[in-house]
Amino acid sequence: MIDKLLLLLLIILPLIAAVKILIIFRKFPKLTEAAALSATLLNLLLAIILFKSEIRFFAPWLGWGLDFSLRLYHFSAFIILAIAGFSFLIALYSVVFMRGKPCLNQFYVYFLLTLAFANGVVLSDNLLILLFFWEGLLLTLFGMIAIGNKNAFQVATKAFIIVGITDLCMMIGIALTGYLSGTMAISQINLPLGGLASLAFILLIIGAISKSGSMPFHSWIPDAAMDAPLPFMALIPAAFEKLLGIYFLTRICLDMFRLNVNSWLSILLMIVGAVTIILAVMMALIQKNYKRLLSYHAISQVGYMILGIGTAVPAGIVGGLFHMINNALYKSCLFLTGGAVEKQTGTTNLEELGGIGSKMPVTFICFIITALSISGVPPFNGFFSKELVYDGALQRGNIFYIIAVLGSFFTAASFLKLGHAAFLGKLQEKNNNVREVSFSMLLPMIVIALLCIVFGVFNYLPLNKLIGPILGESRLGGHNFSGFPVNMKLVVVSVVVLIAALLNHIFAVRVKGSAIKASDHIHHAPVLSAIYDRAEKRFFDPYDIGMNITRKISKVAFLCDKAIDWIYNVLIVKLTFAFTNEIKRLHNGSYSMYLVWSLLGLFLVAAFLVH
């Protein structure tokens, strides 16, 4: 009974803290910060206590399959622990970063509600209960973005519409899945793909990959990077969305449906992953803003996860899951370094930075570690998860492997540009007085950066203790993916690609004379220049395309409405006046004329009766 109570506390505790902040502590910033820190710390302790437990909570609720059913097992416990860890570290970071900001109270309310809903999503063993918490995250997503800068409300609306539409697809998918399986209990669903089941699979996948930030449901993320509070970016797009989206994607592919290498849906997932990798990283390469560059990498990296899981082979699935936790680590830390730079310099525009590495050495070191990790440099964690994804992709087709490796080249090139432009080079005069951020902002960065090293050097810990049990021996086929990659040919190719990215950067800086222009030769290449120009004008943004279509439909509908109004309010009125005027003219008071009309009417009536 106690373990079930502790399970419920993972959802209830953050909710209570959020309500207290909203009602009781709203005028006391110190109490608000203390409440947020206490709640996230207690949540972390609960996650640690429950980590190796297997608990089910079931309560009949409204009938018709709507039972309040929660399940904690190895996979969900792993995600809960990761969510708890990121929540506490980012809350600690936010205490300093958000101090003095407007809407501080609302920020922590949305923060804690997000934590409660995220825990609910992971623990849910009923698709309808999962949907309830999933939609709660849509509301807090809107709220956390909306309290940002002056343009934040428009960005929040954009995010709400995009995610809301994909959530609607997911609702239909849940209804179909429940109809086909005869149950809403996730742990009892295991459907073969084909017919309506394939449609249900696709609709559920749309919800999962949208939550993870994959293309084509991504375009709100770069906008949010500029307008939403920075801790939001480290918490949601960098960590929570990857954990929740990929968690649900894995449950769909491994548990709820039987995805295999012979299915065309496996190819579809790999295509989505490959397209997301290459298109997003190409956009990241040309960015000149610290946060916006990171936001495109948050999109690109999820492509590796989708590609890995989509391969439906053990190496790819393990690599995709390993990359999920690795990306959450280094991407959240990278956003935190961006926040530290913004806090101390007042900008994340790379043209206004440069040389601050000597002023902010700890932040710079954390950036270096996490940049090397995301670029796939050995022995950091990103190297090992990418090599597994490469291995799985190569088993399914050379083209997927080539795209994944090409994505790594552009990733390394963009982080060489970012690190050089922001932290190295000549220090601008306005940044002479820049100092390192406070310890409470440094500690989360240091902890996460160290984990990037630990998860690389000692990768058997996450691979064997956290990820291996998710698949089980039957799916692993006796393979042990920890340690150094077995396929040395893939390793050699990866190292060559990284060296090529370094040489590309050195050459470009020498030619252009500036690190910030290190990607200009790619940006302004003959064919790419026109594509980039259109991309920067949002020509390919699905949201803008949809809005343009909606505006045109609205314009046509408006013209039709005006035409109908004109017919009823103008044309018919004029015809009526003309007819009545003619009637008035004919009614001139002449008895002989009235007699003629009467006889004519009598004649018409008689003719009608005779007929």
Image (tube, helix red, strand yellow):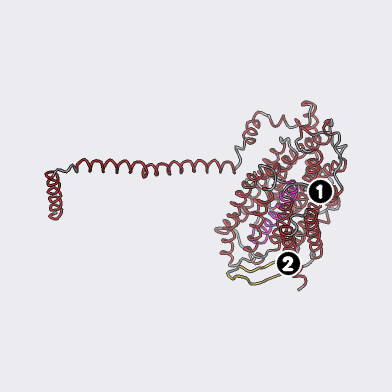
Q: Position of residue 427 (x, y in %)?
A: 84, 32
Judged left or right of residue 362, residue 181 is left
Query: Does residue 356 appear in this view?
Result: yes
Judged left or right of residue 51, residue 529 is left
Q: Residue 8 has which mark? A: 2
Q: Position of residue 232 (x, y in %)?
A: 73, 49
Q: Are marks 2 and 1 in contact (CB under 8 Å)?
A: no
Query: Does residue 190 appear in this view?
Result: no
Q: Please give the range of residues in magenta.
A: 229-258
Residues 274 and 76: in front is 76
Reading the image, the residue beneath label 1 is 96
Q: Earlier in the sequence, mark 2 or mark 1?
A: 2
Residues 20 and 166: in front is 20
Picture quadrant where residue 423 is located: top right
Q: Position of residue 532 (x, y in %)?
A: 65, 34
Residues 45 and 607: in front is 607
Quick check: 313 above or below 8? above
| Amino acid at pointer 1 | Val
> In the rendered structure, does residue 237 fall within the stretch colored magenta?
yes
How many marks the image carries: the answer is 2
> In the rendered structure, does residue 276 fall within the stretch colored magenta?
no
| Residue at 68% over, 29% down | 524
**What secondary structure is marked by label 1?**
helix
Quick check: 278 above or below 123? above
Picture quadrant where residue 7 is located: bottom right
Assess disc 1: are there few (<14), some (14-19) or many (≥20) residues with their C-alpha within 10 Å of its C-alpha. Answer: some
Q: CA distance from mark 2 to mark 1?
A: 30 Å
| Amino acid at pointer 2 | Leu
Assess disc 2: are there few (<14), some (14-19) or many (≥20) residues with their C-alpha within 10 Å of its C-alpha. Answer: some
Judged left or right of residue 478, residue 458 is right
Quadrant of image for the N terminus = bottom right
- Magenta stretch: dominant secondary structure: helix
